[in-house]
Image: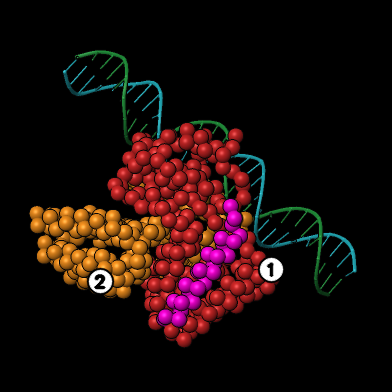
Chain colours: A red, B orange, C green, D cyan
Amino acid sequence: MNGSIKAAEPRRLYQQIADQIRTLINGGHFPAGARLPAERELAQQLGVSRPSLREALIALEIDGSVEIRMGSGIYVTAEPERRTWQTGSMGESPVELMEARAAVEGAVILAAAARVTPEGLKSLRQILDTMRVEIEAGRKPLDQDRLFHLTVATQSGNSVLAHIVGDLFDERHSPISAQIRTRFETPDTWHRALEEHEAIYAALEAHDPLLAQAMMHAHLEESKRRWMENEPR
Amino acid sequence: MNGSIKAAEPRRLYQQIADQIRTLINGGHFPAGARLPAERELAQQLGVSRPSLREALIALEIDGSVEIRMGSGIYVTAEPERRTWQTGSMGESPVELMEARAAVEGAVILAAAARVTPEGLKSLRQILDTMRVEIEAGRKPLDQDRLFHLTVATQSGNSVLAHIVGDLFDERHSPISAQIRTRFETPDTWHRALEEHEAIYAALEAHDPLLAQAMMHAHLEESKRRWMENEPR
DNA sequence: CTAAGATAATTGGCTTGACCAGTTCAGTCA
DNA sequence: TGACTGAACTGGTCAAGCCAATTATCTTAG
């Protein structure tokens, strides 16, 4: 009975559904303040079960896109002026995402380089070592990649910033579901990413904020390039 | 074997479950990296159904407390830091929030100063004029304040960054409504904030990124100070 | 005896179907 | 006319089951 979404591969279903609904909202199908179809109906329209739809709605509710009123309905959050930037004429979201990461992580690492502790360096060292092992074992060190950036952010000593870095890594801020998450990089590209991580680590170890920032910027710039090459789309 | 949760609270069940699990994690019952019981078992232990438990897990997954690995299990996120302000044990959140805003908005305004358009400057000019009117009418220009920061972020041309700035302003990164939103500043403090905004505007108009960044940092630093004075807590 | 491969549990992912509990609103009756 | 009521919404929750990915176990070939 399901036809629209499925594809059964990439991400959890509730995330796909949430992205799809977000797209409908941003696309104007459901203007701010509007009530969405009832859960049962919406689920059928999207070709998914109600529990899955509910999971997506909870995600949307948490990120504030939607308000759920028991017995009444599901409403698009009515924050005025919220979508002004939506017409942004510039690059597509993947590019924006990487730019945003460069801006945020570049700022974060300035503090991290100044505040990083020996324990923090030790953690990073271990993450990189594990990452190298994973790569040479032919596996994709996605977790280590994420953990590295998150740990660097943690070293800033600011949990809010660390949270944002994690969100950006997980693509939780991309407005229009861009799903770049495929990530079928080759061992070679992963190896280059590792070396860039190493450069960042070295700069942190030297407590050199500006160098660390430069290395982080270079890394994210390269990451963007690698992505864009692999995703002709 | 149940009866642990159920308490006729108005809050939705998945939120109660999520809170309970969060408490268990923070309480050390499930140390970082540990694997939680299987969904079926955990649901039974908590006295709820599996779908409800799943909804709670999605909430926990989104806020990063937990990581779900298909076919493997549910793991406590191995972030060795900062569950602090969530447990309310050490209220560092306002300071961290303002630091995060300084880092992010400081980075954003670098791009904004370079890319700002005449239309963007016009919008900002109008916002500041309105803000001045509101202040002198004895009202709190909360909307104008928010709009100013958001519009500056928009001028960076990056919707992801703009989104983050909005989230930070709305304190959406603070878990479980810590909401410091009281904000009963006096007309005088608002007037000082306005002048700081004016300084930022002037730097943007002059297309001077570093000056704009400095003014933004100064503004947020002052904001933090104003808050801390008014909120002895 | 060891290591590689096949197999059986175990676990999360998703669906179907059902019933309960607030909310809405139109039809009813004073 | 207007307050009331109850049916028809709506979201909230639960139960049981099957599928797919992962992991643990056992078998078997070397």
Q: Which amino acid does label 1 sit on?
A: Gly
Callout 1: chain: A
Q: How many labels does the image show?
A: 2
Q: Residue at x 47, y 33 (%)?
A: A41
Asked whether residue A22 appears in the rendered view, the answer is yes
In this rendering, position of residue B207 left or right of residue B183:
right
As displayed, is residue B170 above or below residue A150?
Answer: above
Classify mark 1: helix, strand or loop: loop
The residue that mark 1 highlights is A138
Q: What residue type is labelled 2?
A: Met
Nearest the viewer among B99 and A192 is A192
As displayed, is residue A51 above or below residue C11?
Answer: above
In this rendering, position of residue A34 left or right of residue A223:
left
Q: Which residue lies furthest to the bottom in this view?
A: A206
Nearest the viewer among C3 and B141 is B141
Q: Which residue is drawn at 11% across and 61% down?
A: B187
Q: Residue at x 11, y 65 (%)?
A: B188
Which stretch did the figure color magenta? A209-233
The residues bearing labels 2 and 1 have C-alpha atoms spaced at a distance of 49 Å
Asked if marks 2 and 1 touch (Cβ < 8 Å), the reply is no
The residue that mark 2 highlights is B215
How many residues crowd around disc 1 within 10 Å: few (fewer than 14), some, or many (20 or more)? few
